[in-house]
Amino acid sequence: MVFTVTVLRRDGGWSRRAVLGIAGAVAAVGVLPGCSWLDREEPPPPPDPLEPLLAGTRRLAARYDAAIAAFPELTTRLQPLRETHRAHETALLQVIGRPELASPSPGNWSAPAGGATPAAAVAALREAELAGQADATEACLVAPADRAPLLGSIVAARACHAEVLTDD
């Protein structure tokens, strides 16, 4: 590259070294943003207020899985309720909008069947549904208006589940 700037000027012009120095500085400024030590990672998004409800929904579904595994004779009664919790999990994941939450690590959501007999397991599931209904109600009360319909339907489903699990 040839610079046609006068090397020395009596009237205060630029020297060749000054021009090369400025050109080098400009080039360095243009290159430095590509350096990895200047790259800043985006901070992770703050936790969504519905993440605890998502975790509770997964635990409820896992309790149903455990009860069905321990007492296969309850499958017909419990499977539709468990599937409802799986549908709620999917809906919550969609509303939260964080794909990394879609795949929880295996084993995090395992739960005991809740009793030594089928009746005890059903009673334990009823108590878990009532606690889950309270959690969903609390989430619904503090959620933004656009999330209230989903949370209201989860509250209603959990109330219905508790009734279905009531001993006749």
Image (cartoon, grey):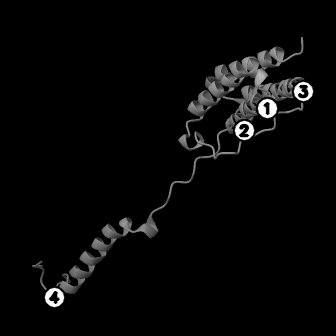
Q: Which mark is residue 14?
A: none
Residues marked 1 and 3 touching at CB (< 8 Å): no
Give the amino acid at mark 3.
Ala
Q: Is residue 44 above or below residue 82?
A: below
Dot 1 lies on which element? helix
Separation (CA) of disc 2 from disc 3: 26 Å
Say left or right for 47 vs 11. Answer: right
Viewer-nearest of discs 1 and 3: 1
Mark 3 / mark 4, whichever is N-terminal? 4
Say which of 112 and 126 sits in front. 112
Q: Mark 1 — residue?
A: 70
Instruction: Say which quarter of the image contains residue 151.
Output: top right
Residue 104 % position (x, y): 63, 43
Q: Mark 4 — residue?
A: 10
Say left or right for 97 vs 10. Answer: right
Q: Residues within 10 Å of mark 3 (few under 14, many from 20)?
A: some
Mark 1 / mark 4, whichever is N-terminal? 4
Give the amino acid at mark 4.
Arg
Residues marked 3 and 4 touching at CB (< 8 Å): no
Say which of 66 and 52 sits in front. 66
Residue 53 % position (x, y): 72, 34
Q: In the image, what residue occupies the spot 87% across and 16% down? A: 166
Give the amino acid at mark 2.
Pro
Residue 117 % position (x, y): 89, 28
Q: Residues within 10 Å of mark 2 (few under 14, many from 20)?
A: some
Separation (CA) of disc 2 from disc 4: 75 Å
Q: Mark 2 — residue?
A: 52
Viewer-nearest of discs 1 and 2: 1
Separation (CA) of disc 3 from disc 4: 100 Å
Viewer-nearest of discs 2 and 3: 3
Viewer-nearest of discs 2 and 4: 2
